[in-house]
Image (spheres, helix red, strand yellow):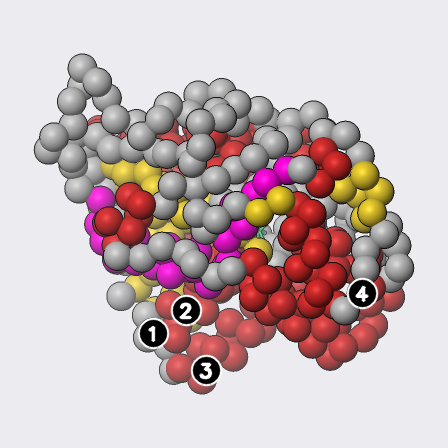
Amino acid sequence: MKVLVTGHAGFIGFHTAKRLLERGDSVVGFDNVNDYYDPAIKEARLKLLERTAAETQSDYLSIRANLADQQAVAECFNEHHFDRVIHLAAQAGVRYSLENPHSYVESNLIGFTNVLEACRYAEIAHLTYASTSSVYGANTRMPFSEHEGANHPLQFYAATKKANEMMAHSYSHLFSLPTTGLRFFTVYGPWGRPDMALFKFTKSILADEPIQVFNHGHHTRDFTYVDDIVEGIIRASDHIATPNLEWNSDSPDPATSNAPFRLFNIGNNDPVTISTYIEAIEEALGKKAVKDLLPLQLGDVPDTYADSSELEKAVGYKPSTPVFQGVANFVRWYRDYYSLDKCSLNKPIDPLSETPGSLD
Ligand SMILES: NC(=O)c1ccc[n+]([C@@H]2O[C@H](COP(=O)([O-])OP(=O)(O)OC[C@H]3O[C@@H](n4cnc5c(N)ncnc54)[C@H](O)[C@@H]3O)[C@@H](O)[C@H]2O)c1
């Protein structure tokens, strides 16, 4: 199959593109390699994708362009016929959306509109796209289920991702475009994002610097290992969304429709507190953290917990990597990566180094 992966220089897009190349698919990646965090890690991921394509002899093309550029997106779809589109590019990060909402409008709203339009005219067989656990916002009934309404986002990031789900539904309804939205729950693992807590905590602990722990470490998160996310993305993409023939408009299920539209959670179904997450990092590093305990921050969702049973029913898979194992894998990668590239340790790892580590 020929698959378009947007955001292939990013954390999850890179892992997804790599897995597709390894199974022999042709991959076209589309990413503007922006500097929201240190682009050096994006360049390193892109190099590894080139190497993987050479080793597996799979077709691979990397396009550097902005999804908000309608012409560039249209050209990409005119030049290639895609069997599947996996849309993972976005302006990610919960806390940054309080500082720079316009970046979310550009990538998540305009960019997503361009992807939908291109999929519509190219009659793409299936569009799979990233949503987030953050859409559950003010909901507190646990575990979070796709069958409950999620209408109270607590930050603009979540609002744009919820908008993506609604935009996708309109295209599924109007143009019979099969779409699957995947609500990822705090993803972590090797090649992870430098703006996220695991990366920042690891860096600070190694440098004997204090880490900022909000809500006094009482947040819980359903941390989900990146390999589990990728397995879920690829299985969901392979399994084309179809209309739910039992969908009842008098009592509308938010997760399905009479159009070919679906939403799934992908989470570990095993939340842990931030304090436990920090213990896993300390154990993997063999070193204790100095914690700066702080109150809850504006816009933070206190707890997340995924019900992943619908995904399991549909594609026969749900995440299961324990946090202590996944964090150890990340720390092993981090040590390897920065010992191979010693000079990187001496320069700032990301332009947001003054902001606290994101949990989503
Ligand atoms: N990592 C998580 O914990 C998490 C949780 C929930 C949802 N998500 C979602 O998963 C997806 C992937 O996230 P990630 O963690 O890999 O983030 P990432 O920032 O590492 O990757 C996103 C990639 O998209 C690219 N991009 C952004 N705007 C673009 C634009 N306008 N045009 C072209 N490329 C653009 C960036 O350069 C980047 O390489 C995103 O949609 C994100 O919102 C991630």
Pointer 3 local density, CA inside 10 Å: few below 14, some 14–19, many at least 20: few
Q: Position of residue 334 (x, y in %)?
A: 69, 69
Tag 3 or tag 1, which sits nearer the N-term?
1
- Disc 2, SS: helix
Q: CA distance from mark 2 to mark 1?
A: 6 Å
Label 4 to label 3, Cα distance in Å? 39 Å
Classify mark 1: helix, strand or loop.
loop
Mark 2, residues whose alpha carbon is within 10 Å: few (<14), some, or many (≥20)? Answer: some
Between marks 4 and 3 in the image, the one whose residue lies nearer the viewer: 4
> To which residue does mark 3 refer?
54
Which amino acid, by three-letter code, is at mark 4?
Lys
Tell me the quarter of the picture where residue 101 sits: top right
Is the residue under label 1 in contact with that under label 2 (CB below 8 Å)? Answer: yes
In the rendered structure, which segment of residues is drawn in magenta? 219-241
- N-terminal of the pair, mark 4 or mark 3, is 3
Q: Mark 3 vs mark 2: which is more N-terminal?
A: 2
Residue occupying image coordinates x 22% and y 44%: 241
Q: Which mark is residue 19?
A: 2
Q: Is residue 233 magenta?
A: yes
Which quadrant of the figure contains the C terminus?
Answer: top right
Distance between mark 4 and mark 1 Cα atoms: 38 Å
Assess whether mark 2 and mark 4 are in contact (beta carbons under 8 angstroms).
Answer: no
Of labels 3 and 2, the one closer to you: 2
For the N terminus, give its image quadrant.
Answer: bottom left
Of the numbered discs in the image, which one, if any, rests on residue 23? 1
The amino acid beneath tag 2 is Arg
Q: Check the image and report above or below for 52 versus 3.
A: below
Q: Which mark is nearer the camera, 4 or 1?
A: 4
The amino acid marked with disc number 3 is: Ala
Q: Is residue 107 magenta?
A: no
